[in-house]
Image: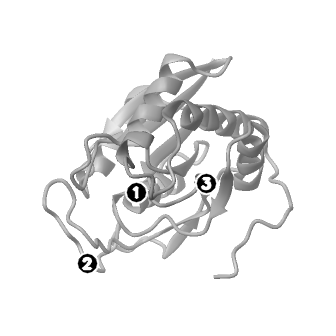
Amino acid sequence: MTRVLLTGFEPFAGSAVNPSWQAVSLVAAAPPPGTEVTAVRLACVFGTALEELAAAVRETDPDLVLCVGQAGGRHGIAVERVAINVDDARIPDNAGRQPIDEPVVEGGPAAYFVSLPVKACVAAVRQAGIPAAVSQTAGTFVCNHVFYGLAHLIATERPALRGGFVHLPYAPEQVVDGTEPALPAAMAADALRAIIGAALTTRTDLRIAEGATH
């Protein structure tokens, strides 16, 4: 069995739910064949989330880590390409912390490219009938904080580990007026299963255009 660690976040910014935790919980309850999936909920708090992630990696000793977060306003699944070494919080986290222009890891590289085949992952999600795209930015809030922390952990302590980050749109119950894109939790879970499959079976990524003009 291939061990997979999925992380989602607790709700933040006054929301009652976080689609990332909804989706990873569904995947853990019905994992892809041949995988043993553990889902862990992270605090939406700078620093604390990295401590919880590191503890989960130690406890589960995974082959693959997929961290998942909420990106309200996005139209589909966003597979992140690069994590940057900066915390620049537009809003406070759940502990009231609001770092501005601070490094995630003091003295760490400016950025890390993800170790997953992002284009193959996006193709797999689309093949499942779910909108998806490669994303060139994970933001500068707690999601990027965790993404960079994971990448730094892989680079410095666990080079055989593969890991990445995926952003999900809002859940339907977060968009009661229909003014923002939303994706049901079951579809988000199916997308994550497709990404897990692609990540575990693809070593050389697809060479197709998935960039952005701005």
Task: Let me know if residue 58 appears in the view.
Answer: no
- Which circle marks residue 79 in the picture? 3
Mark 1 lies on a secondary structure that is: helix
Residue carrying label 2 = 100
Q: How many labels does the image show?
A: 3
**Cβ atoms at labels 3 and 2 below 8 Å apart:** no
**Quadrant location of the N terminus in the rendered image:** top right
Mark 3 lies on a secondary structure that is: strand
Measuring 47% from the left and 45% from the top, which residue is drawn there? 68
- What's the distance in space between the residues labelled 3 and 2, CA to CA? 25 Å
Label 3 vs label 2, nearer the camera: 3
| x then y, percent, for residue 114 | 61, 58
Left or right: where 214 falls relative to 183: right
- Mark 1 or mark 3: name the one nearer the start of the chain: 3
Left or right: where 17 falls relative to 5: left
Name which quarter of the figure residue 172 lies in. Answer: top left
Q: Is residue 210 above or below residue 75?
A: below
Mark 2 lies on a secondary structure that is: loop
Q: In this view, does 100 lie above or below 188?
A: below
**Quadrant location of the C terminus in the rendered image:** bottom right
Label 1 packing within 10 angstroms: few (<14), some (14-19), many (20+): many
- Which circle marks residue 143 in the picture? 1
Measuring 24% from the left and 56% from the top, which residue is drawn there? 13
| x then y, percent, for residue 83 | 51, 65
- Nearest the eye: 7 or 111: 7
Query: What amino acid is labelled 1 in the image?
Result: Cys
Q: In this view, does 200 lie above or below 84?
A: above
Label 2 packing within 10 angstroms: few (<14), some (14-19), many (20+): few
Query: What amino acid is labelled 3 in the image?
Result: Val
Spot the residue most to the right: 207
